[in-house]
Amino acid sequence: MDKVQADRWRGVAERTWRPAALLAACLAVWHLITVTGLVEAYLVPSPAKTFGLLVDKWSYLWGHTWVTTYETILGFVIAGVLGVLVAVAMVYSRTIESTAYPILLFAQVIPKIAIAPLFVVWLGFGLEPKVIVAVLMAFFPVVISTVTGLKSVDTEMLDLAATMGGGPVKTFVKIRFPAALPHLFAGLKVAVTLAVTGAVVGEFVGSNEGLGYVILQANGNMDTPMLFAGLIVISVVGVLLFLLLDLAERLMLPWHASRRGAAVTTLLAKGGS
Amino acid sequence: MTGTLTTPAVSIGDVSVRFQSKRAEVTAIQQVSLDVAPGEFVSIVGPSGCGKSTLLKLVSGLLSPSSGSVTLLGEPVNGPRHDIGFVFQRAALLEWRSARRNILLQAEMRGMNSAEAGRRADELIEMTGLSGFENALPHELSGGMQQRVALCRALLHQPRVLLMDEPFGALDALTREQMNVELHRVWRETGTTVLLVTHSIAESVYLANRVIVLTRRPAVVHEVIEVDLAGTRDYSATMARPEFASTTAHIRELLGAVTGQD
């Protein structure tokens, strides 16, 4: 039991030390650049100053972080549900697929930052425009990955299901959807990071709260430490949401994750045998 | 029981299958007729790509013939039939389900009584030597074990007709022999009618009452060979029998002739 525990921690340490070392190296380089005066301090603040500010202005940043996180999660969830529904409709109906695909593609290639002002005009400075931009950013990868997943089911498995006579609903619930989950999760992980970007873009265009607003304000005041702090917090939010999904994937798909050795996803691994 | 000894379990009457390829219309099967008696074990051999698998799809209703008729257990086949068991070359297991739960998929899809299905699954697990592997996930099982799970799943609802499409084609020779012995025992114990498509001449003869030899595409029935071996077949003893040797030699010759002609 204790040995298992020890092995587990050794495994975690083995996987973590390389990224940790790289992160430390980056911080060191950042520190050196600022202390040697290679770059002016008002252009790039020192790590000490940036993290000091993070601590000092924590309550200010926390409020804005929560706003952006809320917009992101809301946008992500809506995009996830809508994306899966649209994907299912597209897989089961060729007519819907051929009708919806061009519109989907169009909605994807149109620059979100260019249409974001329109949402502000329509919906004002509240929550809605940010969520809509987040949804638009996150929607496409969910649809594409779910369609791929649903189509990747063995034809033999579907033939077999037909001879078992469970009907389309049972076939979907017991065979097709679970088989699509690995693809779906890949799409969701991309989507959640894009949703963060979407929320921040929405805030850039018009808002008085959120991390996008913090960054714009800091930019206007030439307050580079606050700007850096805002960037760091946004990145941390994105990474945490990603890791949360990764964890959900591991819990829901142990049969799949156990046979996979992706570097990004091993961070939270339970140190398998 | 609707079928009697006089009603064949499977009746294929003058069936042709044509499909449209990019350039031309291709005839996969041409005017094939075949009757399989209840409880009979029939092997189907023929050159690669001759339409052996197509024949099984016709019987299961997964495919409709271009002309002719297919009757299963006295009822004409139109649309997928639920009163059969199907085993493919690939085990086609759900990788997130344990061996036992993969077998029980059959019951869940059919809405069978779960207690009864559980008992039946345990019986089959015992019968096919899967005991101890009930909770293993497919990727933890060897190819032979996976195929046993697929066989159990196909037998769970006690189908009167079992269709097998090269079920042991992906297994190594030793495992394959072992599976042949087990399938022979399962067939004797269940009394199920079996249609087996295979590439192995030895397998086809060892297991069957009759071997159907098909020609190259468009497939027609080249010859039907009655296998005159005892009811219970010990593997090595059967292999050593002169009737076995002469029958396999005859089929090999037929297939050689069949693939050579054009």
Image (cartoon, helix red, strand yellow):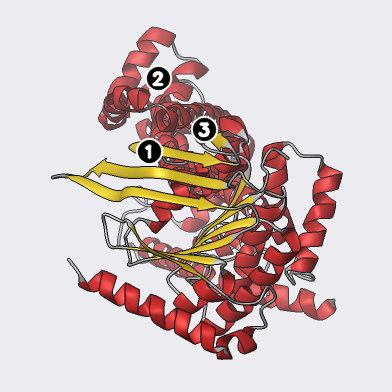
Residue B256 horizontal side relative to residue A81, left or right: left
Does A230 sit above or below residue A16? above
Q: Which residue position holds label 2?
A: A206
Which numbered circle lies on residue A80?
3
* Figure quadrant of the C terminus of chain B: bottom left
Image point (62%, 53%), residue name: A253
Image point (37%, 79%), residue name: B252
- Image position, residue B187 (x, y; %): 68, 64
Q: Nearer the viewer, mark 3 or mark 2?
A: 3
Q: Quadrant of residue A178?
A: top right
- Give the alpha-carbon distance from disc 3 to disc 2, as whole Å: 25 Å
Q: Amino acid at mark 1?
A: Gly
Q: A36 or A137: which is nearer to us? A: A137
Image point (68%, 75%), residue name: A273
Q: Nearer the viewer, mark 1 or mark 3?
A: 1
Q: A157 or B230: which is nearer to us? A: B230
